[in-house]
Amino acid sequence: MEFLDSIPTGRTATVSPVRASVPRAVPQAVDPRSAHLRRHEGGQTVWRVQCGDLINRERCVTVFVDDSQVVLVGPPGETARMTGSQLGQLRTALNEAAKLAER
């Protein structure tokens, strides 16, 4: 029995079509600087702001809306150390989440 591309000769392989993922429309950002922070995960909008911890490891603070409330998730069991720029990104994410929660 000969093998061609790891399919035995004389056998037919069923190949599922590959579906290209269709990008979801991203709503216009209130602040264009935050567009790279905002993602759509599991059907909801999530903001991830990069930060560090007390020993300078890379971490992130996550912001999302749940039942018309803004949820802020810090690094698990950690402290989030943020630069002025990162604080600006967090402020923008919180403002956008607050507006989304009001809808």
Image (cartoon, rainbow, N blue to C red):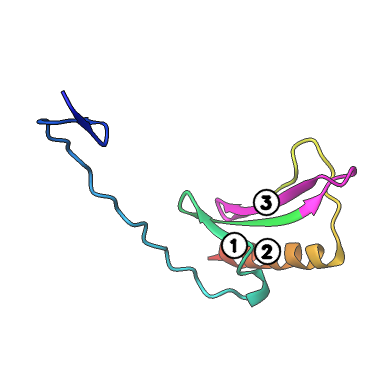
Label 3 SS? strand
Residue density around tag 3, few if under 14, some if 14–19, many if 20 or more, within 10 Å? many
Q: Which residue occupies 60% across, 69% down?
A: 35
Q: Name the residue under label 2.
A: 93
Residue topped by disc 1: 38
Marks 1 and 2: in contact by CB < 8 Å? yes
Furthest residue to the top?
A: 1
The location of residue 83, given as percent across then percent down, is 86, 61
Q: Where is residue 27 in the image (x, y as percent from the top left)?
A: 50, 71
Q: At 74% across and 37% down in the image, what residue appears? A: 76
Dot 3 corresponds to which residue?
Answer: 62
Task: State the mark number for residue 95.
Answer: none
Kind of residue sitting beneath label 1: Arg
Residue 100 visible at all:
yes
- Left or right: residue 79 versus residue 14 is right
Of residue 49 and residue 93, the one placed in the foreground of this image is: 49
Q: Using the image as rendered, state which of residue 92 and residue 9 is in the foreground.
A: 9
The magenta region covers: 51-72
Mark 1 neighbour density, 10 Å: few (under 14) some (14–19) many (20 or more): many
Check residue 89 for magenta coloring: no
